[in-house]
Amino acid sequence: MDNDKQTLTFNQPLKDETIKLQNDRSITRIEHLSTELFVTIFGYLNCYDIYEAFSNLNYRFQRLLNSSFYFYEIDLNQFVPTRNKLTALPCLFFLSIIIDDTDENVGEIYQLILVLPKLKSISLTINSIDSQINLLTYTKKRQSTIEYLSINSRITIGQIFDILAYTPQIHHMHVRQTEMYSRRIHLESPIKLTNLTHISIHKFDGNLNQFETFLSQIYCKLKYLHITLT
């Protein structure tokens, strides 16, 4: 009987410890961590690495990566050496890029952005003067799915026409400032954009006649127009 008691006494705390470890393990499983915590963690990771690691893990992470409240921050200094990786992110719906200073061809980067198959909204801010020259001079391969476009930098009228010609689904367009270069702004035929209802140009470098000429090159059903002539 003493042996039985000793056996019982020995096994009981071991069983309790096992239960405790099982409970601790269930609490620390990755599936039980909050969504808010994952969003915070993702903020420290490269967006390409996030998709590589989590996109096919389970349904929960697929929903998180495709959700409208999750936004990606891209460090261009890290992104440029591996910019072709951007095409491996096919489920991006909203994208905001801020470029402070780079000698790279921003137009080449923008070309990769335009071919993302599900991209609906893009906000592009360029603070580097050197990066503005070839902003939208990209190879015209396919039409974009972009519906909301915001360019927070100076671009030419010709560049606006270039991008509008390949964004047939666009609804809203915001441009911070235009430049009137020597390129003629007359097109062979107006660009047909039946979904375009909102145009906002904070600073249009030209007179009213030039703006009317610009607007006549776009066939759309405007409901909202904001423009400041300079």
Image (tube, rainbow, N blue to C red):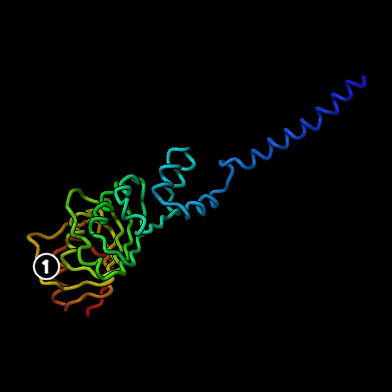
**Count of marks overlaid on the render:** 1
Q: Is residue 78 above or below residue 89?
A: below
Asked whether, in this view, residue 206 is left or right of residue 172, the answer is: left
Q: Secondary structure at mark 1?
A: loop
Q: Is residue 146 above or below residue 1?
A: below
The residue furthest top is 1
Asked whether, in this view, residue 151 is left or right of residue 165, the answer is: right
Residue annotated with mark 1: 185
Question: What amino acid does circle 1 point to?
Answer: Ile
Image coordinates for residue 189, horizontal then vertical, percent: 9, 59
- Residue located at (62% from left, 42% from top): 28
Image coordinates for residue 177, horizontal then vertical, percent: 25, 72
Other-residue count near label 1 (Cα within 10 Å), few / some / many at <14 / 14–19 / ≥20: some
Q: Is residue 148 above or below residue 86?
A: below
Q: Is residue 18 above or below residue 111?
A: above
Image coordinates for residue 222, horizontal then vertical, percent: 24, 64
Quarter of the image for residue 215 reads bottom left
Quarter of the image for residue 7 reads top right
- Residue located at (64% from left, 42% from top): 27
